[in-house]
Amino acid sequence: MKALRISFILILANVAPCFAQQQGQALDGCTPQLRSETKFIIAPGVMQGLLLKKALPDAADMDPSKDFTIKVMVIIDETGAVRCAFGIEGASELYERSARTAQQWKFKPYILNGKPVAVKSAVYFHFSKGRVEGNFSTK
């Protein structure tokens, strides 16, 4: 029984880091509770229409011959500020850089039944040939 318990602990120790990486790096204020509480997922075209300000990550230190696309989930609060951002797809070494940049984006509040509500959507950062683009689509 003790050997079984030790085996389970070893398996869990090896699986947990993989799960954490798949979930993306959480930044300050980006709690699992906040992620699950935000129920409205907004389409890219709608988010584009609400966008007021965006920033792009610095790519000066990157190899210009490599291309990356990073998908960042953003949770936008009732004021239109990005309250939470975390990388979920792409090169994990660019998650934090991309998420911190996405937190600088600003939106008009999303109105539902006459009241502003918190929403979530995805932002994509495309790193290519030493340049970066940020938008709401995979291309």
Image (cartoon, rainbow, N blue to C red):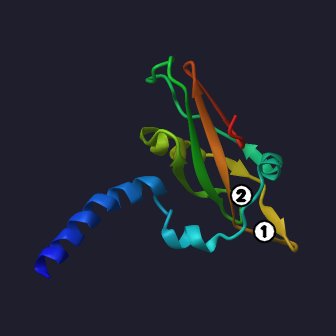
Foreground of the two, 20 or 121: 20
Quadrant housing the C terminus: top right
Q: Are marks 1 and 2 in contact (CB under 8 Å)?
A: yes
Relative to 58, residue 99 above or below:
below
Residue visible at 12% across and 74% down in the picture: 3
Name the side, left or right, on which 112 lies relative to 35.
Answer: right
Foreground of the two, 132 or 82: 132
Q: Looking at this rendering, what residue extends furthest in the right direction?
A: 114
Residue 101 percent location from the top left of the image:
56, 42
Q: Which mark is residue 116?
A: 1
Name the side, left or right, on which 69 lies relative to 29.
Answer: right
Of labels 1 and 2, earlier in sequence is: 2
Q: Amino acid at mark 1?
A: Pro
Q: Amino acid at mark 2?
A: Gly
- Does residue 135 appear in this view? yes
Residue visible at 24% across and 71% down in the picture: 8
How far apart, in angstroms, are the residues tagged by discs 1 and 2? Answer: 9 Å
- SS class, disc 1: strand
Quadrant housing the N terminus: bottom left
Q: Which residue is mark 2?
A: 80
- Quarter where residue 42 is shown: bottom right
Residue 4 percent location from the top left of the image:
18, 76
